[in-house]
């Protein structure tokens, strides 16, 4: 297992280089450059050329990429065009807020989706199964921005139960850690609920389908023939086998969570990496955009690695042999 993990980590290098190469060239396909957004339109052409030269934008794109890649290999992603701060510092300041939302949504999704999918499969064709099916299709059809705005309108504007924006109230910033933690959790309710509902629908359907397939296997019929209770058959024998495809889906859902974080964090003004990325895109802040792309790719790849490790935990028969 250790050698397998090491090989996967070494594979990060060519994958990240490929991601950075595509992202860098696609980003520069947009017309114009960052100087057009914050330079006075009446500025002299010579001054504009000097600013572009300071940013290195006057050089051929392949030279720009080569210089960026050489710096990135030393974990130097440059400085933000807007603030002048190192990109890595700005990302690290925002990353914990994004991970807080994603981990909370991830855990909540698993705690709800897996039992729902199992019960839906066991109670196939019942009113409960039909209700879960309708809920799942509705969840897959609802746009994330619309759901977030509707939850904000209902629970923040009309009912005034939860705060609509931000991560912490200004009045408790200097309070003790317990009060601040409770306040942050209160601010998390709406964004985490939005992300969870959107993830819940698909995972529930996959869990139901996987469970139905396992329940029709011969070893389940043998377990029932031995006189084992239905609860033991479902949760001890069937569930563990049905979790294998769900581990795959959970790993593949990470890109969707990151993509959703860009929208959700913008709607709820959550000070995370997703909101920072949206601001960087609008400002054409190339170094910050590239830093966020690379950081997102690293987290997604590591998430998929954890999913592969999860296979061996769920099914002891799976072993990653030396190749």
Image (tube, rainbow, N blue to C red):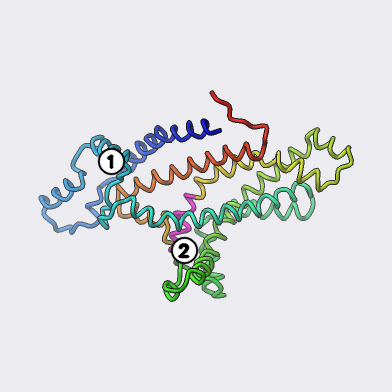
- Residue 215 location in percent, x, y? 78, 40
Q: Secondary structure at mark 2?
A: loop
> How many numbered marks are there?
2
Q: Report the residue at 58% width, 56% height from top.
A: 196
Question: Where's residue 102, x and y in %?
Answer: 52, 54
What SS does tag 1 mark? helix
Residue occupying the point 14% across, 48% down: 49
Q: Which residues are magenta?
A: 258-269
Relative image position of residue 188 (x, y in whole percent):
52, 64
Residue depicted at 44% across the width and 66% down the height: 166
**Image quarter of residue 226:** top right
Residue found 40% across the figure and 32% down from its top? 14
Q: Mark 2 vs mark 1: give the one in front.
A: 1
Residue 285 colored in magenta in the image: no
Rate crowding at label 1 as few (under 14), some (14 to 19) or many (20 or more) other CA atoms within 10 Å.
few
**Of the pair 22 and 94, the residue shown nearer to us:** 94
- Quarter of the image with the N terminus is top right
Nearer the N terminus, badge 2 or badge 1?
1
Q: Tell me residue 320's x, y (percent).
A: 58, 30
Left or right relative to 101: residue 38: left
| Mark linked to residue 242 | none
Q: Main secondary structure of the magenta part?
A: helix
The tag on residue 268 is 2
Placement of 197 over or under 321, stated as above or below: below
Task: Report how far apart the C-alphas of labels 2 and 1 lie in the structure.
Answer: 34 Å
Vertically, is 108 above or below 226? below
In the image: residue 181, left or right of residue 76: right
Q: Which residue is mark 1?
A: 71
CB contact under 8 Å: marks 2 and 1 = no
């Amino acid at each position: 297992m250790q050698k397998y993990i090491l090989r996967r980590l070494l594979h990060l290098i060519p994958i990240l280089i490929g991601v950075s190469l595509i992202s860098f060239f696609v980003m520069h396909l947009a017309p114009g450059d960052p100087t057009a957004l914050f330079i006075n339109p009446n500025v002299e052409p010579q001054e504009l050329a000097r600013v572009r030269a300071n940013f290195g934008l006057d050089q051929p794109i392949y030279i720009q990429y080569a210089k960026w890649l050489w710096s990135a290999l030393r974990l130097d992603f440059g400085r933000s065009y807007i603030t002048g701060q190192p990109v890595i510092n700005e990302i690290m300041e925002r990353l914990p807020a994004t991970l807080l939302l994603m981990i909370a949504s991830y855990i909540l999704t698993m705690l709800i989706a897996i039992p729902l999918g199992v019960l839906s499969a066991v109670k196939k064709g019942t009113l409960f199964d039909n209700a879960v099916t309708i809920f799942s299709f509705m969840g897959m059809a609802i746009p994330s921005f619309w759901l977030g705005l509707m939850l904000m309108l209902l629970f923040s504007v009309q009912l005034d139960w939860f705060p609509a924006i931000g991560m912490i109230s200004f009045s408790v910033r200097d309070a003790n850690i317990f009060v601040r933690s409770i306040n942050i959790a209160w601010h998390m309710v709406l964004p985490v609920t939005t992300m969870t509902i959107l993830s819940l629908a698909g995972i529930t359907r996959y869990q139901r389908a996987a469970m139905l397939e396992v329940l029709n296997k011969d070893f389940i019929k043998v377990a029932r023939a031995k006189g084992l209770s239905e609860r033991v058959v479902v949760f001890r024998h069937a569930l563990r086998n049905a979790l294998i495809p769900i581990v795959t889906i959970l790993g593949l859902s990470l890109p969707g969570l990151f993509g959703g974080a860009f929208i959700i964090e913008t709607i709820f003004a959550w000070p995370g990496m997703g909101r920072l990325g949206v601001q960087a895109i609008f400002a054409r802040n190339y170094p910050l955009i590239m830093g966020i792309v690379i950081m997102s790719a690293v987290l997604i790849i590591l998430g998929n690695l954890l999913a592969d490790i999860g296979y061996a935990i769920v099914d002891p028969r799976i072993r990653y042999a030396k190749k």
